[in-house]
Image (spheres, coloured by chain):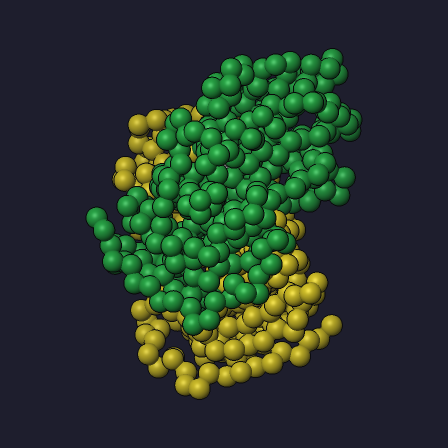
Chain colours: A yellow, B green
Amino acid sequence: MSATIEITRIEKSKIASVDFNNLPFGSVFSDHMLTCTYKNGKWESPVIVPYAPIALDPSAKIFHYGQSIFEGMKAYKDAKGNTLLFRPLENCKRLNKSAERLVIPQIPEDVFMQGLKELLKVDDAWIPTNEGSSLYIRPFMFASGNGFHASPADEYKLMICTAPSGAYFAGKVNVLIEEKYARAANGGVGFAKAGGNYAAQFYPTQLAIEKGYNQVIWTDDNTHEYIEEAGAMNIFVRINDTLLTSPTNDRILDGITRKSILQLAEDLDIAVEVRKISVAEVVIAAQSGTLKEMFGTGTAAVISPITGFGFQEKDYELPTLEMPFASILKKAITDIQTNKSEDLHGWRVQL
Amino acid sequence: MSATIEITRIEKSKIASVDFNNLPFGSVFSDHMLTCTYKNGKWESPVIVPYAPIALDPSAKIFHYGQSIFEGMKAYKDAKGNTLLFRPLENCKRLNKSAERLVIPQIPEDVFMQGLKELLKVDDAWIPTNEGSSLYIRPFMFASGNGFHASPADEYKLMICTAPSGAYFAGKVNVLIEEKYARAANGGVGFAKAGGNYAAQFYPTQLAIEKGYNQVIWTDDNTHEYIEEAGAMNIFVRINDTLLTSPTNDRILDGITRKSILQLAEDLDIAVEVRKISVAEVVIAAQSGTLKEMFGTGTAAVISPITGFGFQEKDYELPTLEMPFASILKKAITDIQTNKSEDLHGWRVQL
Ligand SMILES: Cc1ncc(COP(=O)(O)O)c(C=O)c1O
Ligand SMILES: Cc1ncc(COP(=O)(O)O)c(C=O)c1O
C-alpha cells in the first residue's frame, strides 16, 4: 500500500535560529510533523504539516485514561550525506506491540515507514551532521476520542515529531538499586512503551536524586531481588569477563539497543549470558572485585556506563577500566549506525 | 486564601439541545470549565471559560510520559433545589495524594474548593434534578510542559469539567477473576488515580468481554490469589451475613464510596471485616451456598451488584436476594447524598 501523503510546508523555516553545535536533547523541534488520524474504524491518510500545537477536547481520553504509547529512534547522516535509520522496522513492530496491549489500533508498517521517510526528506536540513549528533525521532500514538468513560477511545492519532540532538555526555552515573518502588507489574504494561510507565518512575527517581543518585535500577516488584532495568534503559552487568543481561519479560522493555548489543557482543567473542541477575550476586561481585562494569542501553544515550551503585545504605564504586566493554560495544554499534563499518546484520536503512 | 476567579461566560448556552431525560454517562458537557495553570513554580489564578478544545504543543509531556491524574465526583440537587456535594474535600485530598506520587504539583485545597463551587454556580442549570441523575464532575491534572525527556514537566494544568449524567442501570454484571493480567504493581501507582492505570486495564477487560464477561476482578499481581478491585471500583463480598472488603494498599484505590459504605454498614449493624479476601474462599463459598453477594463501589455507579463470576473456566452464579445489602446500602448512601436522610457524619456539603 502506498498512501498519498499531503504535505503542507512551513512558510518560513526556523532552522536559522538553531545552534547545531549546542543542541540540548529533545527540546528543539524540526519544522514539520506527521499526523495520521484513526477515525470511523480506520486510519486516514497521513499528512505532513508545520510543527504546531494540537487542539483536543478536554474530554479526550489521553487526558484521563493514559491511553498513550511512544517510540524513540534516530536518523544519522553519514560522511556522504546519506540519511540512515537503524532497524526502524523494529520500532514500528514494537509500537504495534505496545498498541495491542493498550488497545490502540495498530498502524500498518508500510504507512509508518513511508510517512517517516517522507518526513525525514521534508526536514532533511534538520538532520545534524556533527559527530555524535543525530535527529531524535519521536513517533507517538494517543487516544484523541472523547468521553468520561474508562474504556478505549474511538479516535486516535499517530504523530511523528523530530528533534535534532547533540551527543550525549553523561558524566558520573551513580545509581540506586530500588527496594520499595516498582515501574511495572507482573501481567502489566512494563514491556510496552506506554506513557504511564514513565510517570510511575518519576517519584522513586526523585527520591533517589534527593539521596545523591542519578538514576534508579528497577528490580522485580515482587521480591526486589532481581535487577531488571536502569532508569529508562535496559541493563548489562559485567562480572569478570562475562556480560549479563536480564531476559525480557512482561515487565521489561525489549530494547532494540539491547538486542543489537547482544548480537555485537557475540560477533566480538564477548561471553554473554541472558539470565536473571540477582542483586545479591552483583553486591558480592562488587565486594570481591569481580564486578567490572554496569551499563544501560537505549536509543537516546546508546550506552550509558554506570560508575557506582547504592544498595541498603551502602555505596559501591565500579572500577575504571582501560578498555571497557561499554566503549568497545558503543563504538561497534555507532559505527554501524553512522556507516563507518560494515553492516553485517542488515540493520541500516538508507533513505 | 481567596483567589479571584475570572469568569468568561459562554455567548449562547448549549443547554436547550440537551435531553435531560435521556442522558448518557459522561458524554454531554456543561457550558463551562475551570482551568488553572502551574507555571514558573506556582499556581496561577483559576479561570472559568466556555467549554472548548485546548491547544498543546506536540511535545507536551502528557502525550509521552503519562503524567496525568483525575478525580470523579458528583453534584446533586435536593428537593428544594440546593446543590449538594458529597465529601468533596476527600476528592481534593486524594487528587493531591495522586499528584505527589506522579510528581505533579499539589493544588491548595481552598483554591480547588472555591473553583469547584464557582464553576457549579456558573453551570447551575446543568445539574440534573431527575431522580438518580446527577452532575458528574471530572477534575484532572496533567503535564502541559514540553520536551522529549522522561522527567517531570515544568508546567501543569488543573481542569474541572462537568457532565450531566442519568441514573446508572447496569443489568447483569458477570465478572471474570483475573489470573494473568494486573492493573497495578507493588510499589507502583495503583493507589493513585493515575491515567496509566486505566489504559492498563483495557486489554484484559477486552479479553474478558470477548469471553462473555462484563468486567474483570483484579487480583494481586504476584500470586493472583487475593481479590483487590472490580473494574474501576472497590469490591465487597458478602459471605453469610458478613461483608468483606480488602484493606487498601499501594495497589488499591482508597475509594470514598468504599469508606462511606464501611461506615454505613457499621451504622446499620452489618458485620464487616476489612481483610484480605482469597479467591479460594470466594469459590468455596459459592460452591457451598454461603456466598450471598458481591458488589463494586464507586462514584459513578455508587453500588454495582455482581450477578456472577467466572474463575478457571467455571462459572458461578450469585443468588437473587429479597433485600440485599447492596440495595440497603445504596439507598442509605444516596439518601444522604440527595438530602433525603440525616447526615450523621457531616458528609454533605451544600453550596
Ligand atoms: C523502559 C525502557 N527500557 C529500555 C529502553 C531501551 O530501548 P531501545 O534500546 O529500543 O531504545 C527504553 C527506551 O529507550 C525504555 O524506555
Ligand atoms: C480503580 C478504582 N477503584 C475504586 C474507585 C472508587 O472510588 P470512589 O468511591 O472514590 O469513586 C475508583 C473510582 O471511581 C477507581 O478508579
The image shows residue B59 at horizontal and vertical percentages of 43, 63
- Seen as rendered, the residue at the extreme left is B1
Identified at 52% across, 35% down, the residue is B334
Identified at 54% across, 14% down, the residue is B271
| Quadrant showing the N terminus of chain A | bottom right
The image shows residue A57 at horizontal and vertical percentages of 50, 63
Q: In screen coordinates, is A206 left or right of B221?
A: left
Q: Is A231 or A8 nearer to us in this picture?
A: A8
Picture layout, residue A305 above or below residue B279? below
Picture layout, residue B116 above or below residue A133? above
Q: In screen coordinates, is B221 left or right of B114?
A: right
Residue B276: quadrant of the picture: top right
The image shows residue A143 at horizontal and vertical percentages of 57, 58
Picture layout, residue A308 above or below residue A31? above
Q: Is B80 or B93 nearer to us in this picture?
A: B80
Picture layout, residue A194 above or below residue B5? above
Identified at 46% across, 57% down, the residue is B125
Q: In screen coordinates, is B219 left or right of A201?
A: right
Residue A17: quadrant of the picture: bottom left
Q: Can residue A179 be seen in the rendering of this structure? A: no
The image shows residue B219 at horizontal and vertical percentages of 60, 29
Q: Is B318 or A304 nearer to us in this picture?
A: B318
Q: Is A146 or A127 nearer to us in this picture?
A: A146
Q: Can residue B213 be seen in the rendering of this structure? A: yes
